[in-house]
C-alpha cells in the first residue's frame, strides 16, 4: 500500500509539475502601442554602412536636437549593422566593438537618452548579420535580455543567412523574447517583403520592410554584381507592392525603407521622395549625414505640414488615384475629413496642371472614405509653400517641374 501511495504521490507531483509549467504564460507578441504613428528618426546604414562609431552617434544626436529635427518628431537614433565585435564572448553574449565604442554601448545609449532621444540597434534572424557579424539564431532570449539591460528602445531585425528557417516563426520567437525580457522595444521586421510579411506581421512587429534596400535615385534599379541582388530607387519601392495598404495602420506600418533625402538626388527628387513617404505613411527614418546636411535638405526633412500628413492619427496609407501622361495624383485620407493630395511629375519634362476637382471624385476602396467635390467644397493649402491656394470650386492650376511634387491639404 505504501508503495502504491508513493507511486500515486510521485505521479501527482509529476502531473502537478507539468501542469504548472503549462499554466505559466510566456510573454508573447509585440509590445502594443509603441508606434501609433510611423516612427521617425535616423539610421546609420544608407550613408555609413559599417563605418560607425560613438563620435558619429553623439554628433548626430547633438545635431538632431540643435537643428530642430527632434522638435519636428525625429527621436530614434538607430545603429545598423557593424556595431558588434566579430565574435560573442565566452558566455555567448554580444560584444559591442570596443574600438568603435570605447566608452561602451551603455554609456552611449545614456548619452542619447540624456538628449531626450531614443536609441535602437540592429541584428539579424540568421547565424550571421548581412555584414558578417554574429546573428541571433539560437540566442534570441539571451540577446533580448542583453538589449533590455542596455535600455534600447528599437530593434531592427534583418533576414540574412537564414537558410532552413521559417520567417514567421523566427520573427515570432524574437518578438516573444523581447516581450519576456520586459523592456518595451519597438520591433522592426526586415525580411524585405519576401514572405509577404504584411499577411502575418501585425501581432509580431510594429513595422515591417516591404522591399529590398533603397538606392538614392528617383526611379532606377541598382544591381550589386558581387552579391547578386538589387537596390531600388524611390519610385520603384513606392510602387513595388500592390494591394498592401489595407494591412498598414497604427502600430503596424508598411516600411518603405530609410530615406535617401540629402544623399545625391536633386532637390526636386528629394522633395518628391519625402512627400511620397509621407503620403504612404511610411516610417520617416533619415539616412543622410547630418554633419554635412544642406539647408535645403533640412527644410525638406523638417517640413511640419508634410510631417503632419505622415503622422496623421487616422494612420491610413495613401494610394494613387490617377496617372495620365506621366502626371500622377496620389491621395491620402486624413482625420477630421481632410485629404492630402500630391501631384507627382514622373517625366523628364515640366508639366502644366489644370485639375478639375468636380470631375475627379475620390473613392477609397480599402477603407471606405470618399470625397465628392460636387457636394462638398474644400479649402486648399499648399504644404510646400505653406499658404492658402483657393478652394475646390475652381480648377487647380500650376506648373510642375520634372520629378517634382506639389502637395496640398484639402480642408472641408
Image: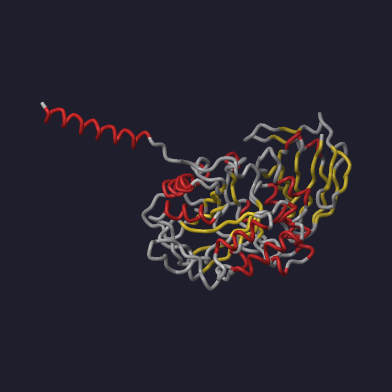
Q: Is residue 306 left or right of residue 399?
A: left
Colour convention? secondary structure
| Residue 286: quadrant of the picture | bottom right
Whether 160 is drawn above or below 364: the answer is below
- Does residue 294 lie above or below 35 as drawn? below
Identified at 58% across, 52% down, the residue is 153
- Tell me if 191 is positioned left or right of 108 in this view: left
- Residue occupying image coordinates x 79% and y 37%: 359
Q: Nearer the viewer, residue 16 or 344?
A: 16
Q: Residue at x 54, y 43 (%)?
A: 31
Q: Look at the picture and state if 92 lies above or below 200.
A: below
Query: Residue farthest to the bottom?
Result: 99
Q: Residue 212 at x, y = what percent?
A: 54, 57
For the C terminus, give its image quadrant.
Answer: top right
181 or 172, nearer to the observer: 181
Q: Is residue 280 above or below residue 359?
A: below
Quick one: 247 or 4, which is closer to the camera?
A: 4
The quarter holding residue 287 reads bottom right
Q: Position of residue 375 (x, y in %)?
A: 81, 29
Q: Residue at x 48, y 41 (%)?
A: 29
Provide residue 186's location: percent of width, then percent of height.
56, 48
Q: Quadrant of residue 32?
A: top right
Residue 230 position, x and y percent, is 54, 63
Camera-side residue of 175 and 262: 175
Q: Residue furthest top?
A: 1
Report the number of numbered marks. 0
Amino acid at each position: 500500500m505504501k508503495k502504491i501511495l508513493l507511486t500515486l504521490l510521485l505521479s501527482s507531483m509529476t502531473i502537478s509539475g507539468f501542469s504548472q509549467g503549462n499554466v505559466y504564460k510566456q510573454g508573447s507578441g509585440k509590445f502594443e502601442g509603441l508606434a501609433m504613428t510611423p516612427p521617425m528618426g535616423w539610421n546609420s546604414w544608407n550613408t555609413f554602412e559599417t563605418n560607425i562609431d560613438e563620435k558619429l552617434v553623439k554628433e548626430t544626436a547633438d545635431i538632431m536636437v540643435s537643428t530642430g529635427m527632434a522638435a519636428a518628431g525625429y527621436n530614434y537614433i538607430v545603429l545598423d549593422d557593424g556595431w558588434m565585435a566579430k565574435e560573442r564572448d565566452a558566455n555567448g553574449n554580444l560584444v559591442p566593438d570596443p574600438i568603435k565604442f570605447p566608452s561602451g554601448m551603455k554609456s552611449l545609449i545614456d548619452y542619447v537618452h540624456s538628449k531626450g532621444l531614443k536609441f535602437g540597434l540592429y541584428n539579424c534572424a540568421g547565424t550571421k548579420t548581412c555584414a558578417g557579424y554574429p546573428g541571433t539564431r539560437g540566442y534570441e532570449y539571451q540577446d533580448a535580455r542583453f538589449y533590455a539591460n542596455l535600455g534600447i528602445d528599437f530593434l531592427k531585425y534583418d533576414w540574412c543567412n537564414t537558410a532552413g528557417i521559417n520567417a514567421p516563426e523566427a520573427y515570432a520567437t524574437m518578438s516573444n523574447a523581447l516581450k519576456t525580457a520586459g523592456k518595451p522595444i519597438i520591433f522592426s521586421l526586415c525580411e524585405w517583403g519576401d514572405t509577404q510579411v504584411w499577411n502575418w506581421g501585425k501581432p509580431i512587429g510594429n513595422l515591417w520592410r516591404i522591399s529590398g534596400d533603397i538606392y538614392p535615385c528617383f526611379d532606377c534599379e541598382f544591381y550589386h554584381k558581387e552579391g547578386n541582388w538589387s537596390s531600388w530607387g524611390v519610385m520603384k519601392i513606392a510602387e513595388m507592392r500592390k494591394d498592401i495598404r489595407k494591412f498598414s495602420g497604427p502600430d503596424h506600418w508598411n516600411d518603405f525603407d530609410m530615406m535617401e533625402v540629402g544623399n545625391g538626388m536633386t532637390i526636386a527628387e528629394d522633395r518628391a521622395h519625402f512627400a511620397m513617404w509621407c503620403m504612404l505613411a511610411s516610417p520617416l527614418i533619415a539616412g543622410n549625414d547630418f554633419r554635412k546636411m544642406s539647408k535645403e535638405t533640412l527644410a525638406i526633412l523638417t517640413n511640419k505640414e508634410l510631417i503632419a500628413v505622415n503622422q496623421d492619427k487616422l494612420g491610413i496609407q495613401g494610394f494613387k488615384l490617377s496617372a495620365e501622361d506621366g502626371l500622377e495624383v496620389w491621395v491620402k485620407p486624413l482625420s477630421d475629413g481632410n485629404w492630402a493630395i500630391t501631384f507627382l511629375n514622373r517625366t523628364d519634362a515640366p508639366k502644366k496642371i489644370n485639375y478639375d476637382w468636380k470631375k475627379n471624385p475620390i473613392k477609397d476602396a480599402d477603407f471606405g472614405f470618399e470625397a465628392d467635390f460636387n457636394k462638398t467644397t474644400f479649402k486648399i493649402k499648399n504644404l510646400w509653400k505653406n499658404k492658402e491656394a483657393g478652394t475646390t470650386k475652381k480648377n487647380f492650376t500650376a506648373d510642375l517641374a520634372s520629378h517634382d511634387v506639389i502637395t496640398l491639404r484639402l480642408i472641408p
